[in-house]
Amino acid sequence: MPYRKKNLFLRATVLQSIRNFFSLRGFLEVETPLRIPANAPEEFIDPLASENMFLQTSPEICMKRLLCRGYERIFQLSHCWRSDERGRRHVPEFTMLEWYRSNSDYRDLMQDCQDLLKWVAEACGAGNGIIYQGQSIDLCASADRITVSQAFLHYGGIDMQAAVADASFDEIMVTRIEPALAGNVPVILMDYPAEMAALARIKPEDARVAERFELYVGGLELANGFSELNDPREQLSRFVETNKKRQQAGSPALPLPSPFLEELSAMPPSAGIALGVDRLVMLLADAERIDDVVAFTPEEL
């Protein structure tokens, strides 16, 4: 497939440019174990078992433990696994970029995202913009920022808290909100309901929302970041609640990452974010399917 070969060369350039970006800004590249005793329990994400452990759904647990141990700026490019994820934009094994900053909050990550997009675009010769699925997008432009509450009122025609209460939040997000974010500049959707941010810090001036945001480009969800919760009691309570919701939905409860909870009180005010590398390459390659930017799909193995 000639187009895939071209995209894999592009992918290599993206990976190298990401490493250069963080190295020049004083971030330490780290490698943490891929097989771990427990991931952070999430309501709708099922990890893959690996003997008596699990493959990581994200490197966040170990990376946050490094923050607790005094590492101030770290990043990682790592493979992650999630069970039963397959679609136009999903594969069960994918590449994640995560970075963490101590003494920072989610606003610092928003700026990182804008700077990173510009850096990668210029490294790939796309400094003047890209075309993604027929839409012209300027990756170097300042991102539009909109709160989830504003988006629900403007595009969803419903109050955000009402959507949470009647369980329509996810459906409205997918069918009305995300399609409306497919503009010609990146979009930062910020201040998610507290119920939708299990590992994020609650916003001090508004307890209804958490300091969480997602980055969208061309309507494609690219990254999810937040100011970190560093209260171990509150985090344990949220994990327990997540497991209750899993069981109510017919899914098994997941083990808790006890060493992480034991170290969490040592974490300074921090912020962290996960960015889908495969999706970033999709944007730059104008690829409709994730299949076009990976060396092998699951069906080819």
Image (cartoon, grey):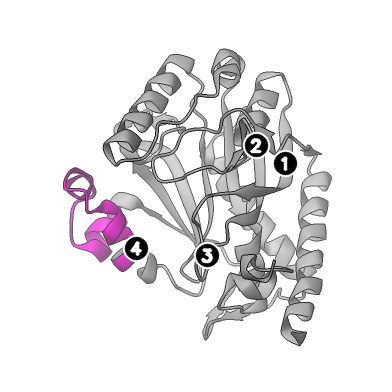
Label placed on residue 174 = 4
* Image marks 3 and 4: residues in contact by CB distance under 8 Å: no
Residue, x 37% and y 32% (percent of image)?
242
Residue 174 lies, with reference to residue 124, above or below; the image says above
Estimate how packed mark 2 is, as few (under 14), some (14 to 19) or many (20 or more) residues with alpha carbons within 10 Å. many
Give the residue type that dot 3 points to: Pro
* Image marks 2 and 1: residues in contact by CB distance under 8 Å: yes
The residue under label 2 is 100
Viewer-nearest residue: 200 or 88: 88
Give the residue type that dot 4 points to: Val
Locate the N terminus and report the quarter of the image it occupies. Answer: bottom right
Q: Which residues are magenta?
A: 150-175
**Disc 3 to disc 4, C-alpha distance:** 17 Å
> In the rendering, at what x and y percent does residue 88 appear?
51, 71
**Disc 4 to disc 2, C-alpha distance:** 28 Å
* Image marks 4 and 2: residues in contact by CB distance under 8 Å: no
Q: Judging from the image, what secondary structure is the residue with disc 1 in?
A: strand
The residue under label 3 is 186
Residue 153 on the magenta segment: yes
Residue, x 31% and y 29% (percent of image)?
244
Along the polypeptide, which appears first: circle 4 or circle 2? 2
